Image: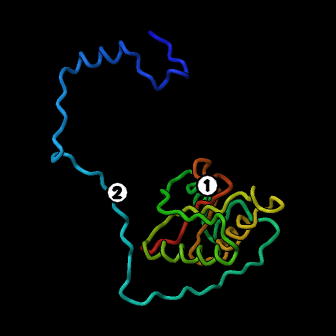
Amino acid sequence: MKKISKNNAGKIAPEDAALFRAAIGEVKPLAEQNRIAPRPPPRKPLLRSSSTPATIPDKLSDFAAETAPDEYLGDGLARMTLRKLRRGTWPIEDSLDLHGNHADAARKLLQEFIHRAEKRKLRCVLVIHGKGLNSAGGEAVLRKLARHWLVQHPLVLGYCDAPPKHGGSGAVLVLLKSNI
């Protein structure tokens, strides 16, 4: 067995190339008319409603506490609900990335996202707000605000930190009310 060094990783030895050619035999190229041109993947269709879009009322306050809770569970819900959310009982059905947005834009995007999720009857969504590592002073402004807004939103039953593969403390799994 030959050792492959990093310098020769992409190169094929001449004896290996000759052995490969001998094994496959004679090759006949495809005719030009038999070739299929590659196509870009199909785009997702935009969901359009025949009615005029409803304006979403902005009822969320920006005045957050100094620290945002790592998890939230609405009144009257069992703690087991939050444990199930953490364990991934509900699959993530959609996600929203708020990176690079100012507070007003992020609040509007979050409200629109939750509104669309309700219309699509989604149950569990991921909101990525970031950890604030690149913000001035290292303060996680969107993290604090996004979690504050989620606590206020009437459709949010609870949230918790996302698993590490989905952003860890820089994102939250959000459980929404079911429309069934």
Task: State if disc 2 and disc 1 touch (CB < 8 Å).
Answer: no
Where 1 sits versus 68, above or below? above
Give SS at disc 2.
loop
Residue 35 at x, y = what percent?
20, 46
Give SS at disc 1.
loop
**Residue type of the residue flagged with mark 1:** Ala
Between 110 and 10, the one nearer to me in the picture: 10
Residue 21 at x, y = what percent?
26, 19
Where 108 sits versus 123, above or below? below
Q: Residues within 10 Å of mark 2 (few under 14, many from 20)?
A: few
Among the 4 quarters of the image, the one containing residue 97 = bottom right
In the rendered image, the quadrant that contains the N terminus is top left
Task: Locate residue 137 relative to residue 12 in the image: left or right.
Answer: right
Tell which tag, 1 or 2, sits nearer the viewer. Answer: 2
Residue 3 at x, y = what percent?
50, 13
- Which is nearer the N-term, disc 1 or disc 2? 2
Please name the residue that numbered disc 1 is placed on.
162
Most extreme residue toward the top is 1
Distance from disc 1 to disc 2, alpha carbons, whole Å, reads 32 Å
In the rendered image, the quadrant that contains the C terminus is bottom left
Please name the residue that numbered disc 2 is placed on.
40
Where 68 sits versus 179, above or below? above
- What numbered label is drawn on residue 17? none
Among the 4 quarters of the image, the one containing residue 59 = bottom right
**Residue type of the residue flagged with mark 2:** Pro
Residue occupying image coordinates x 65% and y 56%: 161
Colour logic: rainbow
Residue occupying image coordinates x 62% and y 66%: 98
Most extreme residue toward the bottom is 52
Residue 17 at x, y = what percent?
33, 18
Where 38 sits versus 72, above or below? above
